[in-house]
Image (cartoon, coloured by chain):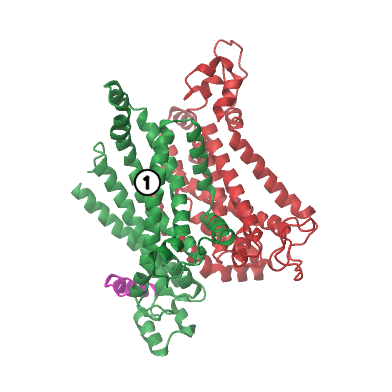
Chain colours: A green, B red
Amino acid sequence: MGRYLIRRALISVVSLIAISMVVFGILAIAPGDPLSGFATNPNVPPELRARIRASLGLDDPIPVQYAKWASSYIKGDWMQSYTSKMPVRDYIFSRLPVTLKILGSAFVLGILIAIPIGVFSALKQYSLFDQFATTFAFLGFSVPTFFSGILFILLFSVKLGWLPFVYDAQVTGFWGNVKQSLMPILVLGLAGAASLTRFVRASMLETISQDYVRTARAKGLREQTVVILHAMRNAMIPVITIIALQIPEIFGGAVITEQIFRIPGIGRALIDGIGSKDVPVVMAITFGFAILVVVFNVVADVLYAVLDPRIRYS
Amino acid sequence: MTQRVEASRAPVLSAAPTATSPQIAETPPGLLRVKPQRSLWGNAWRQFRRHRMAMLGTAVIILIMLACYLGSALYPQPIDAQDLANTDQAPTLQHLMGTDSLGNDMLARILWGGRISLAVGFVAAIVAITLGTAIGAAAGFFGGFVDTVLMRITDLFISLPQVPLLLVISFLYKQSFYDYFDKNFNNGILGIFVLIVAVIGILNWMTTARLVRAGFLSLKEKEFVEAARSIGAGQFSLMMKHILPNTMSPIIVAATLGVGAAIITESALSFLGLGFPSDVPTWGTMLYQATDYFQIAPHEALIPGIMIFLTVLSINYIGDGLRDALDPRKTQ
């Protein structure tokens, strides 16, 4: 396991380097020279402009520029945001809490919905409940978040007037925060729940037809014990890895949700950064997403091995 | 849901355990009639026809396509007849889907935009499938070094940060694609179409490549391939004529689901203002423009949203039906 981890870590570092090259290359060869976009950006004061030019080495060839960017990134210097006039790292970390709060709640909500429904659906396969659950999962899986978000706004904000549809970072009270976070959490949580339910159901269906489940029943164990201790424990192994793999995807979904509800989080920062050609911000966020994908791929594989004694990596 | 259909068709078997009955029910035992010979596709079609939601989905998609491609030619209202006296109107007899914030007829724009959204979906899926099939086939067939290199590239693409890259590329390269196509083909929108389709295709071929590679790896050792090789079939014909057709099932399912995913991606891009320009009506741009008029004209957001949802839902059901129909374990 130790050697396996080391090898995976090395591969991850290599692929992160490759990804950063791809991302940097896309920005560097883009028409309109976005890397020096700050030169025409009126928000950038002249002395900062000179500093950026020097630190980016904009007159160097692209590989040298990349090397400079990479070394400063590793040192933790993510450069200055062109528009917000603060270091990119501070800017991103100031945007992160609200995103994490909403994504985290949505994530938990999704799991809390998906696991009981998926398990129950599998236990009562083809029952009325199962048919409703699979149909709703299918619907939820097919509705894009930008549309479900708009539906929620039309229903809860416009029609009923219960919830505000523009997120206001100035709101401090607990209830105010709950109210304005409710719709984004629901949108993301339900979307996640829809696809997860299908996995839970499929995995549970496969497990309950296994011999060891029949053995457990034959021993005369209570149904509850069979389902929870014997079937569910095993059915959850692939589900947990799927959940780990979905985490980067959830962050991707945050981009759209934050745009719909005007939440000043990391996804909004990306869209704003793209709109204002704020390359350091865009680069840092994009690369952050890449790190998430790579890390959670490893996490999923390792979790799989840890949870399932039948799987051994060497 | 399928069960009830089966039961009514083969009453003898309605008391049989239900979990596996749909397949058995199709040919009641005890009937010694010579069965007409069935082809692979005939079998798949028979299986597909019994998936009620898939059939409904097919009907809906055909209807939407007919409406968009024929209907938009027949429907008299233009897409850009701005009528500033009648903006944001709810559906009326004159404007069956109401008007938007500039007084344009919504139905005309929905039909026109549907053409673009559907075209993006289909072309992007074709790009992704072609790329994935070519790369997967080469990796699986040649093996060794080619396989290693191609699979490393596939791994790299899988770990690319999809969403940010999609947004960044569309934003950065949009203008130059527009200008280039405007200058050379006199059609700048075509340039944006090409860009969006290419980006979606290039970021989504990896699953297909892995599926095709796995299929090739297991099939190339089979006797029929050996037989074909022994009678002198060339490398290319082995790949294209003998192995590829046998890996088609997962490709077809992936392609179908890819169409729906591409439609969502295009709409999301346009919704974020990074896809088609706002004067080109696609379902995504219409939704994007509608967000400023929630209070006064909810239909402006509801109608394009419902169209996207209905289209994607139908495509996903078709994919579901195809998966069942093409699964060899499910047909006899």
Q: Residue furthest bottom?
A: A46
Q: Residue furthest left?
A: A2
Q: Residues within 10 Å of mark 1 (few under 14, many from 20)?
A: some
The residue sitting at 41% across, 39% down in the picture is A118
* Magenta residue check for A2: no
Q: Where is mark 1, residue-wise?
A: A242
The residue sitting at 75% across, 50% down in the picture is B70
> Is A288 drawn above or below residue A311 in the view shown?
below
| Residue A160 percent across, percent down from the top left | 56, 58
Q: Label 1 is placed on what type of residue?
A: Ile
Q: Is residue A217 left or right of residue A190?
A: left
| Residue A81 percent across, percent down from the top left | 39, 77
The chain under label 1 reads A
Dominant SS in magenta: helix
> Is A129 drawn above or below residue A75 in the view shown?
above
Kindly tell me whether residue A21 is visible in this rendering.
Answer: no
The span picked out in magenta is A62-78
> Is B116 drawn above or below residue A78 in the view shown?
above
The residue sitting at 73% across, 65% down in the picture is B104
Q: How many numbered marks appear?
A: 1
The residue sitting at 62% across, 66% down in the picture is B293
